[in-house]
Amino acid sequence: MGLIPTGGSLPGTAAVHELGFDLNGRRTSAVSGNLSAEVPPEFARAVRLALRYLHETRRISQSVLLGSLVVYERAGEASLEQRILALRGLLCEHVEKLARSPRTEPSYRALLHSYLAPASTQILAAERAIMAYGTYRRYLASGLAEVAATLWLHEHALKQT
């Protein structure tokens, strides 16, 4: 089993995460003493909150993702305003990537109407996404997980360099 250490997570956390694969190339959970190969919950929560506060400068300015390597890669040693713009751009790009595949396009619609062009309620977001409410909630969750995973993989890749 090849384990690839990710070297930590967000600033302020000291956890070490590992990606594990079995001989067939399937992802495995790490065994006792090691953390799971999944996106760290605090990172996934930070992505969800950043999307929720995408249009609220005061709130997104408090996002822990502003200290992430993916934002640093885009904005460098820029001002807070520039880092906020970089984070907003990253989030929008990663959501919009979901529209490119028929498999993830419903997740894109759910995220679009929840965060990028938000409806006033989730019921209205489901209607705009042309989905039943339960289906909308399922695609919203899977879309959030996909965006968090792609951002986490990008963060991980930057830590390796």
Image (spheres, rainbow, N blue to C red):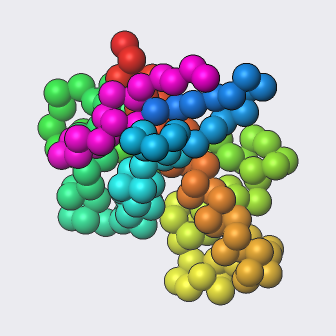
Q: Position of residue 107 (x, y in %)?
A: 70, 58
Name the outermost residue toward the front. 32
Name the outermost residue toward the top. 161
Q: How many labels does the image show?
A: 0
Asked whether 64 falls inside the magenta stretch, the response is no
Report the magenta residues as a range: 1-17
Nearest the eye: 27 or 133:
27
Residue in the image at 58% along x and 42% along y:
29
Task: Look at the image and tell me whether residue 60 can be seen.
Answer: yes
Q: Where is residue 120 in the image (x, y as percent from the top left)?
A: 53, 83
Nearest the eye: 78 or 147:
147
Residue in the image at 52% along x and 32% along y:
19
Q: Is residue 50 left or right of residue 72?
A: right
Q: Is residue 138 left or right of residue 68?
A: right
Residue in the image at 46% along x and 39% along y:
152
Residue in the image at 51% along x and 65% along y:
115
The image shows residue 125, relative to residue 83, as above or below, that is below
The rendered magenta stretch, by its main secondary structure, is classed as loop
Q: Residue 160 appears in which quarter of the rendering? A: top left
Nearest the eye: 127 or 101:
101
Q: Where is residue 113 in the image (x, y as percent from the top left)?
A: 61, 68
Q: Residue 1 appears in which quarter of the rendering? A: top right
Q: Is residue 86 left or right of residue 145?
A: left
The image shows residue 147, relative to residue 53, as above or below, that is above
Task: Look at the image and tell me whether residue 84 can be seen.
Answer: no
Nearest the eye: 8 or 54:
8
Q: Position of residue 123 (x, y in %)?
A: 65, 86
Asked whether 10 falls inside the magenta stretch, the response is yes
Quadrant location of the C terminus in the rendered image = top left
